[in-house]
Amino acid sequence: MDAGETLSVIWRVFVQIAVAIFVLLPVWGYACLIIALTMATSQFLVPAATVFFIGIFLMIHFALWKQKIFLWIGCCLMALALLFGGAVQFHRRWTVDRFAQLSSEVRWWEYAPFKGKKTVQVTPEAQYRLSGKIPTMDGAYALYPVYAAVVQSICPRNDYSQTVRTNGSDVTFARLLGNQYKEQPVDLIFSAPPSQEQLKDAAELKLTYEITPFAREAFVFFVPSGNPVSSLTQEQIRGIYSGKITNWKEVGGPDLAIKPFQRNKGSGSQTMLQKIMGKTPIIPPIEEDRVGGMGGIIRDVAAYRNSGDAIGFTFRFFSTEMFRNGSIKLLSVDGIAPTLENIQNGSYPFLTDCCVITCRPRSENTKKLIAFLFSPAGQELIRKVGYIPLKPAATQQGHQ
């Protein structure tokens, strides 16, 4: 075999390998793209789309160079991908506009101690100023402005980004108990009272929660602003979240199926829903209707503004101060609106306590911090943030 024949064989092998690559690459990329577009998240969308369109580009060039049939195949695949991807994205945009991290939805740094421009500060009496080891703390999203303001008011100026954090109630209780994370448990948390599951978790570790309520808050239900329904009864709410009421026309609204959103298990607001429901079982949510952060549930319900069929829940302060959204409206319950006045006089039916919770012996600084909340300056701070302060009461023991 002379050199010319050898080169010819090598060329034919190269062409066959190239054809296989050019055919398999776009097919694989197309499959990845379809999978990515139909997943709950689109984290693989960019690389899959990149591989797909590179494959199409190469295949089209090869087709122009050799055979036109490849050109038609490439164009058809590209058109199908664009149509399918466009339809999926359009559906998402007008149903659930998902945000994976609540930290990207709320500007937490605006409330951070000694850093935030929205952080409230008061002048405490000298006996409440802390020195030495400052208690580590975590808490519910909606209560971060309170304890961040407490730190700024009574603690030395410092960077508290690692010791004063907010992670939501489910993570917060786990960090207090120290049963899930390879780090020292926090000294105290700011949260609504624990759920039965969280009480059980403490009991398994032979720990008992010490719970000190310091403020009162309203648990609210909301709908897209275009929904004509402005009030529901307690029984209607239980009916919606048990699946007995499934259409808005049953409660005086339009003829639309109700889409009841829920939060993740262990969150403060989901725990509050469970308390409201009592022994009435909650309808299992489909995956699309269970959302993580409280900002997520507000965004998701607001995204249904074109049809008005969704309903969600959260805490009043979070929806009206931290995550204002003009596309939702808060519902009255039994004809009573969740205003500060109605929270203070106790007429709004769904109220909950905001608490400082510990599960180990309280240090002197922890006791000082809690005492500050009931001092004149502490009560002023709570009001300035936007909550209704409570008068001192006996610390409760958290048992099952």
Image: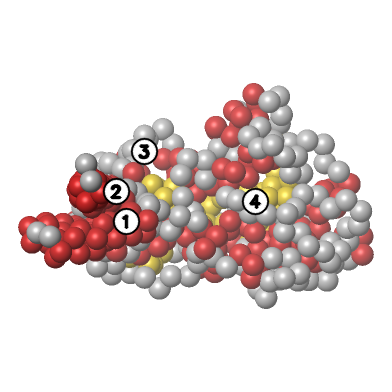
- Quadrant where the C terminus sits is top right
Residue 372 location, x and y as percent?
Answer: 81, 58
Q: Judge depth for marks 2 and 1 and give the one in front.
A: 1
Q: Which residue is mark 3?
A: 282
Q: Which residue is mark 2?
A: 32
Say if mark 2 contacts mark 1, CB within 8 Å: yes
Amino acid under label 2? Cys
Residue 139's tag is 4
Q: Residue furthest front?
A: 2
Which residue is pictured at 24% across the width and 67% down the height?
Answer: 306
The Cα–Cα distance between marks 3 and 4, rounded to whole angstroms, is 26 Å
Amino acid under label 4? Gly
User: Seen in the image, is 394 located left or right of residue 255?
Assistant: right
Which residue is pictured at 32% across the width and 39% down the height?
Answer: 283
- Quadrant where the N terminus sits is top left
Amino acid under label 3? Ile
Amino acid under label 1? Val
Q: Which residue is mark 1?
A: 51
The Cα–Cα distance between marks 1 and 4, rounded to whole angstroms, is 43 Å
The Cα–Cα distance between marks 2 and 1, rounded to whole angstroms, is 9 Å
Which residue is pictured at 79% across the width and 52% down the height?
Answer: 370
Q: Judge depth for marks 3 and 4 and give the one in front.
A: 4
Earlier residue among tags 3 and 2 = 2
Say if mark 4 contacts mark 2, CB within 8 Å: no
The Cα–Cα distance between marks 4 and 2, rounded to whole angstroms, is 40 Å
Work out whether residue 252 can be spotted: no
Residue 380 location, x and y as percent?
Answer: 73, 68
Say if mark 1 contacts mark 4, CB within 8 Å: no
